[in-house]
Image (cartoon, rainbow, N blue to C red):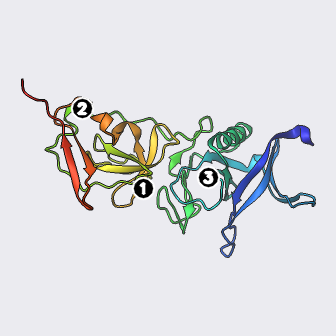
Amino acid sequence: MTSNIILEEFLFKKSQQKRRTSPCNYKERYFILRKDELAYYEYRHAKKPTLKGSIELSRIKCVEIVRSDVHIPCSFKYPFQVVHDNYCLYVFAPDKDTQQKWVWALKEETKNNNLLNKYHPNFWVDGRWRCCSQTEKLAAGCVEYDPTKNGSRKPLPPTPKDNRNQLFSVYGSLQRQFSDPGAMVVVALYDFIPQGAGDLMLHRQEEYIVTDQSDPNWWIAQDKNGQSGYIPSNFVIEKSPDNLEDKEGAFIVRNSRQAGVYTVSVLTKALG
């Protein structure tokens, strides 16, 4: 009955690969969330919709946003996961608002279920969990699941009580810089030791490429060796001349006109 419908919309889903020989594919389906089930249908022109799958809401153990930097081959780029029984259904929304709308609605309808204590915030890909590198698909999650929140991982750590004016001292060890014209590059203000699986270590004064800012507190970044993970957003600053302000001894590294060469500009105050 249409009166039971909470949400309905075209979304993409990834095959759940319940068998080892099952193919990995992404298909557009018409999802309908009712008070008792989540169902998805195949629509074909001039044909009656075909039910392709359904999940009883009472069997759902976790609903959460997926935070990852992996390439998503379908046109919808905002994933969330529905964990039920021993399976994980990955669903892809067209935008962040739609993603959050479905996650909140599903969380509200399943908040009284027998829920997981921990979940995996990243994808299961190529035989391992990208968040914690566990190779057992049924392994316990690595991040605490909070059914009342929308995917924010944990509070930010306090920043060290360093003298901020000395953070960009030219006397610090300079690493070879890297950048992508289309990406946000940040510089670590402080060292950061990972607090849990999926975190990325930060080294003060080194650069990192930010690939996901959907969580305001914990961003996904990549270091110069290609390693990715979560970093606290209050431990970094965007690489920009505007961030130098009026701090003597601050510096910025720019690409030189000559390929492979870098120019270091140091801020100094003239005497007199």
**Label 3 element class:** loop
The residue most toward the top is: 272
**Label 2 element class:** helix
Instruction: Give residue 164's mark.
Output: 2
Amino acid marked by disc 2 = Arg
Q: Residue at x 26, y 56 (%)?
A: 257
Q: Residues within 10 Å of mark 3 (few under 14, many from 20)?
A: some
Amino acid marked by disc 3 = Lys
Whole-percent x, y for residue 4 in the image:
87, 39
For label 3, the residue is: 77
Indicate the quadrant where residue 252 lies: top left
Whole-percent x, y for residue 154 in the image:
47, 38
- Who is closer to the viewer here, 155 or 263? 263
- The vertical placement of 216 against 129, above or below, is above
- Residue 2 placement, left or right of 137: right
- Residue 56 placement, left or right of 124: right
- Who is closer to the viewer here, 257 or 30? 257
Q: Residue at x 62, y 34 (%)?
A: 148
- Who is closer to the viewer here, 98 or 251? 251
* For marks 3 and 1 on the same chain, the one whose residue lies earlier in the sequence: 3
Q: CA distance from mark 2 to mark 1?
A: 26 Å
Of the 4 image quadrants, the one containing the N terminus is top right
Q: Are marks 3 and 1 in contact (CB under 8 Å)?
A: no
Q: Residue at x 29, y 40 (%)?
A: 189
Instruction: Give residue 211's mark.
Output: none
Q: Are marks 2 and 3 in contact (CB under 8 Å)?
A: no
For label 1, the residue is: 228
**Label 1 element class:** strand
Q: Residues within 10 Å of mark 1 (few under 14, many from 20)?
A: many
